[in-house]
C-alpha cells in the first residue's frame, strides 16, 4: 500500500429502515455517540425509509430536525433492502461509506478499525461475522449452503459470512452507482467491482429491538436473485444433463435390441415406463422453470424502470450555514 491517505475523511453511514420504529430511539444515541468518538472531518447518517408502514418515517424526520447530520430519504414504497441500500449509497456524500443495519446487529465500534485500514490505503474493508450465534441455526446453515453453491457456480466469489456491513471508499461507491442493472444483489455487486480489499472479524449482535424482515421465502428468493445475477451455470447444465440422458437412452436401446435378438420379445410391466416418463417430464419442467427464472429477469430488466423512487428528502442545513 504505497499511497497513504492523510486527509481525515467525511463518513456516510447508510442505513435502510423498514418498519423499525422500535429501534430508532436506541439507534441514534448509540450511533451518534460512537461516530463522535472517531477521527473524522465530519459524518452524516443517511436514513432510507423503505416504505415503512409504522411510525418509522415521523421518527426519522424528527431525529433529522434535531440533528443536521441526520438526513432522511423517503422512498415512495417498499422497494426492498437492496434498492434502499442503492438509494442511500447514491445520496451519500462522504469520502467513505458504510452500509449499516438499523437494528444495530453490526456493532458501530468496529468502524474505528475500518477507518484505520482505509487510512492505510484500502478501498474496501469487509467485516466478517466470526460469531453468528445470534442468528438461528437454520439461517446459518442455509446461508452457508448458499455461499457454497453460489461460489461454485459463479465467477464472482462472495466472501462467506460477510454481509453488507463494510467500508467502501468514494471511488468504489461511484463504481457501484455506475452499474446499470436494475435488479441489484448488493453483496454480488460489491464483490464484482473489486478494488483493494481487506477483511476484519467481528461478532454479530442480536437485534436491538423489533423483528427480522426476512422470512424463509424472502431469503429463498434472495438466494435465487444472487445466483441468477451472477451465474449462467443453471442455464447451461441442461445441455449436459440432456446429453447424458440421451446417451443413456441410446445405450439402453442397444441393450434392448441385442436382448430381443437373442431372447425374443418379452413384455415386462409398464411401471418402468411410467417411472421414466414422469422422471423425464419432471426434469424437463425443471429445465423450463430455470429458463423462466432467467427470462423473467431479462423481461423485468428490459423495462429499464428505475431501481427506486424518492418521494421526499428531509435534511437541515448545518447551523453554521444559516
Ligand atoms: N430492510 C429494508 N427493506 C426491506 C427489508 C429490510 O430496508 O424490505 C432493512 C431493515 O430495516 C434493516 C436491514 O434492512 O435495517 C436488515 O434487515 P433485518 O435486520 O430484518 O435482516 P436480518 O438481519 O434479519 O438479515
Ligand atoms: Mg438484522
Image (cartoon, grey):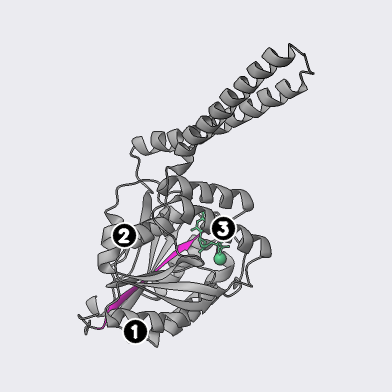
**Image quadrant in which you'd find residue 68:** bottom left
Report which quarter residue 138 is drawn in.
bottom right
Residue sitting at x 58%, y 49% = 220
Horizontal relation, residue 35 to residue 275: left or right: left
Q: Nearer the viewer, residue 148 or 172?
A: 148
Q: Earlier in the sequence, mark 3 or mark 2?
A: 3
Nearer-the-camera pick, 298 or 112: 298
Query: Which circle's residue, 1 or 3, is located before the other in the chain?
Result: 3
The region drawn magenta spans: 8-20
Q: Residue at x 44, y 71 (%)?
A: 63
User: Which one is in front, 170 or 201?
Assistant: 201
Relative horizontal placement of residue 142, taking residue 81 as reference (left or right): right
* Magenta-drawn stretch contains 270: no
Label 1 belongs to which residue? 116
How far apart are labels 1 and 2 at the CA level? Answer: 22 Å
- Disc number for residue 54: 3
Figure quadrant of the N terminus: bottom left
Task: Tell which residue pokes out farthest to the front in this image.
Answer: 262
- CA gap, disc 1 to disc 3? 38 Å
Dominant secondary structure of the residues highlighted in magenta in the image? strand
- Residue located beneath label 2 in the image: 193
Amino acid at each position: 500500500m504505497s499511497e497513504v491517505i492523510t486527509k481525515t475523511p467525511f463518513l456516510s453511514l447508510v442505513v435502510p429502515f423498514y418498519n423499525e420504529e422500535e429501534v430508532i430511539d436506541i439507534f441514534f444515541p448509540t450511533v451518534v455517540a460512537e461516530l463522535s468518538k472517531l477521527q473524522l472531518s465530519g459524518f452524516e447518517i443517511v436514513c432510507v425509509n423503505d416504505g415503512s408502514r409504522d411510525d418509522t418515517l415521523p421518527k426519522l424526520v424528527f431525529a433529522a430536525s434535531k440533528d443536521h447530520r441526520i438526513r432522511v430519504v423517503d422512498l415512495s414504497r417498499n422497494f426492498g433492502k437492496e434498492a434502499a441500500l442503492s438509494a442511500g449509497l447514491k445520496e451519500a456524500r462522504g469520502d467513505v461509506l458504510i452500509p449499516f443495519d438499523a437494528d444495530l446487529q453490526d456493532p458501530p465500534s468496529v468502524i474505528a478499525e475500518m477507518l484505520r485500514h482505509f487510512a492505510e490505503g484500502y478501498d474496501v474493508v469487509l467485516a466478517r461475522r466470526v460469531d453468528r450465534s445470534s442468528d438461528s441455526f437454520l439461517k446459518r446453515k442455509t446461508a452457508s449452503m448458499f455461499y457454497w453453491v453460489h461460489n461454485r457456480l459463479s465467477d464472482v466469489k462472495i466472501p462467506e459470512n460477510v454481509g453488507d456491513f463494510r467500508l467502501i471508499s468514494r471511488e468504489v461507491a461511484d463504481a457501484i452507482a455506475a452499474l446499470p442493472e436494475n435488479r441489484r444483489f448488493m453483496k454480488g455487486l460489491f464483490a464484482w467491482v473489486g478494488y483493494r480489499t481487506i477483511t476484519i472479524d467481528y461478532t454479530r449482535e442480536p437485534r436491538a429491538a423489533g423483528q427480522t424482515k426476512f422470512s424463509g421465502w424472502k431469503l429463498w428468493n434472495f438466494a435465487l436473485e444472487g445466483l441468477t445475477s451472477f451465474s449462467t451455470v443453471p442455464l447451461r447444465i441442461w445441455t449436459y444433463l440432456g446429453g447424458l440422458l440421451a446417451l443413456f437412452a441410446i445405450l439402453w436401446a442397444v441393450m434392448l435390441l441385442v436382448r430381443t435378438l437373442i431372447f425374443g420379445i418379452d413384455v415386462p410391466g409398464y411401471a418402468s415406463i411410467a417411472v421414466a416418463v414422469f422422471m423425464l417430464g419432471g426434469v424437463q419442467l425443471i429445465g423450463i422453470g430455470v429458463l423462466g427464472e432467467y427470462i423473467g429477469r431479462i423481461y423485468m430488466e428490459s423495462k429499464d424502470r428505475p431501481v427506486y423512487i424518492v418521494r421526499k428528502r428531509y435534511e437541515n442545513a448545518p447551523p453554521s450555514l444559516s
